[in-house]
Amino acid sequence: MRLDRRLQIADWRLHDLRRTAATGMAELGVQPHIIEAVLNHVGGHKAGVAGIYNRARYEGEMRDALKKWADHLEALIVGPRKQPVPISLMERAFAVARGSKIVPEEDLANLARQLTPLKRA
């Protein structure tokens, strides 16, 4: 959280990232039932009688939604792609979490400023 203090970002929790991703995917045109599936929520289209009959897993749709979200985040960090990037944003995120320096700190700071997690009002 040193980076948060340095960038003067308000206090946040990991759950705020789920809310941010859900809102961001909705703004990118992902259907609500796919967002719920990505978040592993059982509600709406999967609750009650509808959930008994609807056993779809939406794997392809979830993959597309997460790809769309990853591309959006990558565009915020490094700008729109001009050529295909050989390593995915998710692989870079895992590498950073493991301590690698694949994404420079200034790029992470740029993302943090542009994508402040949505907080419950």
Image (cartoon, rainbow, N blue to C red):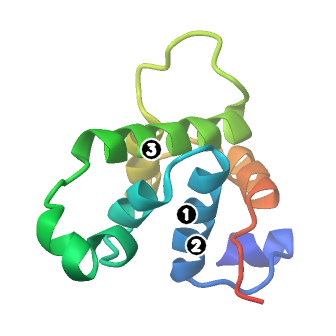
List x then y, in percent, for residue 90.
41, 44
- The image's mark for residue 50 is none
Residue corresponding to mark 3: 65
Quick one: quadrant of the C terminus?
bottom right
Residue 63 found in image quarter: top left
Gap between marks 1 and 3 measured at Cα: 10 Å
Q: Residue type at mark 3?
A: Ala
Q: Quadrant of the N terminus?
A: bottom right
Residue of label 1: 22
Query: Does 71 sit above or below residue 4?
Result: above
Q: Residue type at mark 1: give it.
A: Ala
Q: Please give the label number shown on residue 19.
A: 2
How far is disc 2 from disc 1 in space, using C-alphas? Answer: 5 Å
Front-lying residue, 96 or 73: 73
- Write the residue at 71% across / 44% down: 107
Residue drawn at point x = 70 percent, y = 24 percent: 80
Residue 3 in the image: x percent, y percent? 71, 69
Give whichever of discs 1 and 3 has the lower sequence position: 1
Q: Is residue 75 left or right of residue 31?
A: right
Q: Is residue 92 visible?
A: no
Asked if residue 29 lies left or right of residue 100, the reply is: right
The amino acid type found where label 2 is placed reads Arg
Residues at discs 2 and 1 in contact (Cβ within 8 Å) = yes
Determine the residue positioned at 13% across, 73% down. 52
